[in-house]
Amino acid sequence: MDSDGKAHRPETAGATESVARFEIRLTRCLNPDGTPCGELPPLARDAEALRALYRAMVWVRMFDRRAIALQRTGQLGTYGASLGQEAVSAALGCVMRPEDVLLPTYREYAAQFQRGVDPADILLYWGGDERGMAFAQGRGVQDFPICIPVASHVPHAAGVAFAFKQRREPRVAVCVLGDGGTSKGDFYEALNVAGAWRLPLVVLVNNNQWAISVPRAAQSAAQTLAQKAIAAGIPGEQVDGNDVIALCTVLERALARARSGAGASLIEALTYRLGDHTTADDASRYRDEAEVQAAWQREPLRRLRAWLAAQGGWDEAREKQLLADCEAEVEAAVKRYETVAPRTPATMFEHLYAELPAAYRAQRDALEVGASSSSLTGETDALAPSLSMGEGGGGGEPTP
Amino acid sequence: MTRNPAHSGSTAITLVEAVNRALAWEMAHDERVLVFGEDVGRDGGVFRATLGLLERFGPERVLDTPLSETLIAGMAIGMAAQGLRPVAEIQFSGFIYPALDQIVNHAGRLRTRTQGRLSCPLVLRSPCGGGIRAPEHHSESVETFFAHIPGIRVVMPSTPARAYGLLLAAIRDPDPVVFLEPTRIYRLVKQDVPDDGQALPLDVCYTLREGRDVTLVGWGAALHECLQAADALAGAGISAEVIDVATLKPLDMGTILESVARTGRCVIVHEAAREAGFGAEIAARLAEEGLLHLLAPVRRVTGYDCVMPLARLEQHYIPSVARIVAAVRRVMEYS
């Protein structure tokens, strides 16, 4: 700005040319009411596949509801629900192959369940037990744990993708983050190297419009988040994130592209967080109820159910049966969660290193002593064995 | 430490050459090992630590990354979780802070978070410390930041032989290792280092010189001054034991305690700023676990609690032989 407040416009010297143009494609198959909005992909006629997707979404919505109830009754810590965003992770779980690697954040439960993660483990994690991310069984045994520090896992995904490429394995690293995460340097740094090195990476932005209390518009002046891919030299596109058919179509294309060696993609799924950010949040402090009510008209379950019903692949009896089945399964998962025996304090050292260094054995042993003495006295006194820590601290190592 | 290299054989090499030799050995013997970072490929690293590796091992194992320290550390985590053995270089320690987030929040925790299902066998190498008249942000001593992080190892070599053996151990270690290389002694001394692939043990301190009256504890380049101070003190009839901490985390406190139990006095020397520096940890442990052996208060000779100065003043910041000798004389006043 000049001192008089006028915008400064430099004179253009010589000829100019456009060196780049881009457009961002938005894919949608079904309208919010479930009617088709154009030519549909084959998946839209595959009733069995659609019913599986619908089941995954209903399942996770019911799981969310139960998890929140557990939190409200003090049986779970802070929990981040996926209400309204079920289609994003259900589609991911559908298109990813077992050998691909998922690097999720905390709203991808449907994909995790489809990849074999026990829902009881997710409850265990939010219940405050690291064993919940052990994923002791399932197909995604190399999947990453839920990433809490926003977008910090996108570089990991680039590293995983590099390993696939270097070993010439036809596998894809799939990383999910939220709209707020696209403001982080980590996100761009990873996209940038994925472009430069042509890595088999798919980055999926779950744009639920709110980064806790900060709306999408305040997050970035870019018209779309998908166009952030352009600067990295990789394709970016938008998809209706409440349209599971569109999501599967777009994601499948991106995964196939990565698998074929053509490189990375960025996909921005336009969805909406119908609930609070987490159970520790109160979205009514910063969000209009009218906006939420409008978003409910576009939510993903209703849309697919309407399409299925129109195709004759769904009816009330099936819906009722599905709800009953899902409820029973969710309750079974809750039961499994509730019956997990607590760990002893000393286990906090169990997987700290591959083998616990001598320097820390005394601390671990003190926890064991504390645990056994508290079982006798009925109380835990972590400070009591501090003398024995001192005596054992780091001694006995050779001095070469 | 060989300060006056009498070795004329072709195996006498500098510390930075030892780093290069260890990388080459391990890459030749373990195809999972790869080296990446800024300018490590064609340029061979700004200090030449990776010289010749690109030609020898090819562009799939020696990679020049974009200029992104967060990415370098974060990518190493992804690679390591996939079974590769990445050795990532951060070009200067003053640029390492963006990587700190990845090491704290992910590398040090992945094994715990997944209960052993995933791990992070990575090495993050970085030149460290001042004394080479580098520009601003190139001379920081960052070891304490990393030494506070659970789940990792922090290693700093003090000689070519130690650099070779400890780097091999770091690469072979199944957990993340931050390997800090003191730039000041990259080329200060030459030493015979057989290229035999023999790793040295991590997690232990090394006694460089035995003594009777006082224990000097240091790591990295500071040991150079510690040994000179020990020479000077010997001339004055004071016998100093010198301990190279080598692996700061986990700390082998046993060796230090045993030494102080014999000498009764301890002076800790490090280049990083004093307040909340790693010397404070050792001093606190001596107070907790070795108090009854102490004949004098523990003293520290460190960098100052100010911004690392530019070239004209950095020699005043770095602990000098005179400052170490003076500190020893202070602790010797107690008898």
Image: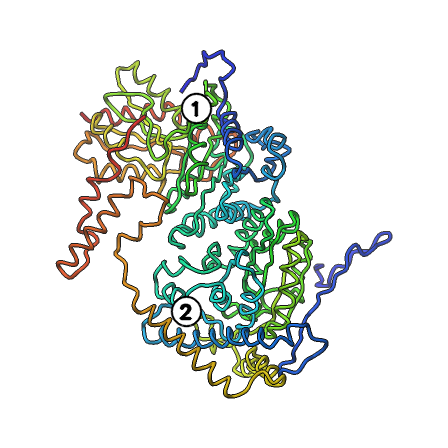
Q: Nearer the viewer, residue A15 or A298?
A: A298
Q: Which residue is drawn at 40% across and 20% down?
A: B1
Q: Residue at x 20, y 27 (%)?
A: B334
Q: Nearer the viewer, residue B269 or B208?
A: B208
Residue placed farthest to the left in the image?
A: A377
Horizontal side of B22 relative to B257 (left or right) equals right
Residue B161's disc is: 1
x and y, in percent, of residue A257 in the image: 66, 57
Horizontal side of A305 relative to B284 (left or right) equals right
Horizontal side of B224 relative to B29 (left or right) equals left
Q: Nearer the viewer, residue A59 or B15?
A: A59
- Say which residue label 2 marks: A79
**At label 2, which amino acid type do we have?**
Tyr
x and y, in percent, of residue B251 in the image: 32, 37
Residue B196's disc is: none
Q: Do labels 2 and 1 share a chain?
A: no
x and y, in percent, of residue A351 in the image: 35, 49
Q: Is mark 2 on a helix, strand or loop?
A: loop
